[in-house]
Image: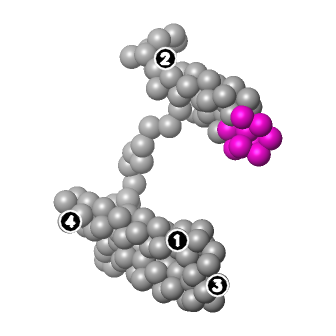
Amino acid sequence: MKIEAKLFLLMAPFFAAVGVVYGYLVEWMEPVGFLALFLTAGMSLMIGYYLMFTARRVGMRPEDRLDAEIHEGSGEQGFFSPWSWWPLVLATACAGAFLGLAVGWWVLYISVGLAVVGLIGWVYEYSRGNHAH
């Protein structure tokens, strides 16, 4: 994770410098652009610090070492539901929410309700039915 931490920590001064240049070019009159770039620099710093902290706690991964073998990274990478439809429901709800911001608030309210149903269904998918633990 050290590579990822360095990448995010090096992106923060870049975004800050671009924010200063952008602010200077628009004479600090356009309040959204340079503020968004400064906030992006802050988020990059937070992610980089988290990855650096986690890298110290977890230790070296095979991806971080130059002498690592391919088989060292093998094994279980995580658990993924192969036949789950809930991510599709949640993605549809999120797309509807963004559409609601552009079209009308009533679409947003319907999408929030669908998102709640999708999230609850995804979380409790393995708590009932054929795949219950």
Residue 68 position (above or below residue 129): below
What's the residue at 42%, 77% (across, down)? Answer: 12
Q: Which mark is residue 26?
A: 3
Taking depth in this image into account, of 16 and 71 the one nearest to the observer is 16
Q: As rendered, which of 112 and 53 lies closer to the eye? A: 112
- Residue type (three-letter) at the residue carrying disc 4: Arg
Helix or strand or loop: what does disc 2 sit on? Answer: helix
Q: Residue 35: which numbered mark, if any?
A: 1
- Check whether the beta carbons of the residues at disc 4 and disc 2 lie within 8 A of each other: no
Magenta part of the chain: 97-105
Q: Do the residues under discs 1 and 4 have CB atoms within 8 angstroms?
A: no
Which marked residue is nearer to the observer: mark 2 or mark 1?
Answer: 1
* Disc 1 and disc 3 in contact, CB within 8 angstroms: no
Along the polypeptide, which appears first: circle 4 or circle 3?
3
Left or right: residue 63 versus residue 34 is left
Residue drawn at (73%, 29%) of the image = 106
Calculate the distance from the C-alpha at mark 1 to the C-alpha at mark 3.
12 Å
Label 4: state its secondary structure: helix
Q: CA distance from mark 1 to mark 4?
A: 32 Å
